[in-house]
Image (tube, rainbow, N blue to C red):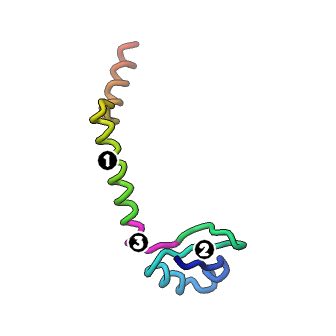
Amino acid sequence: MRTMAAKEAKDKFGALLDAARREPVTIAKKGRPVVVVLSIEDYERLEALEDAYWAERAAAAEQEGLIGAEEGERLLSELLNAQD
């Protein structure tokens, strides 16, 4: 992964965009990494991986007997309405 100083990234923004399309680029400020710039394709791939991870976790929770968000909201609504 390439690293650029923040000033270089600012001064050579076009070059930063070109580099980020090829591979993620770390931007450092005062020698400390602060952000990573990556292509939209890499970002979308990471988002899809995260979505798949949480879908798998939700399915496992449901198999263990935990209820989903919709059912939880319905149950909570029923309990609150029963107190009236």
**Image location (x, y in percent) of residue 81:** 36, 18
Could you tell whether 28 is left or right of 43 in the image?
right
**Image location (x, y in percent) of residue 21:** 44, 80
Looking at the image, is mark 1 or mark 3 earlier in the sequence? 3
Of the two numbered discs 2 and 1 in the rendering, the one whose residue sits closer to the viewer: 1
Write down the residue under mark 1. 56
Measuring 62% from the left and 80% from the top, which residue is drawn there?
A: 10
Disc 2: CA contacts within 10 A as few (<14), some (14-19) or many (>=20): many
Write down the residue under mark 2. 27
Measuring 32% from the left and 31% from the top, which residue is drawn there?
A: 67
Q: Are marks 2 and 3 in contact (CB under 8 Å)?
A: no
Could you tell whether 32 is left or right of 73 in the image?
right
Could you tell whether 8 is left or right of 84 in the image?
right
Measuring 33% from the left and 24% from the top, which residue is drawn there?
A: 75
Write down the residue under mark 3. 40
Q: Nearest the camera: 64 or 4?
A: 64
Looking at the image, is mark 2 or mark 1 earlier in the sequence? 2
Residue 29 in magenta?
no
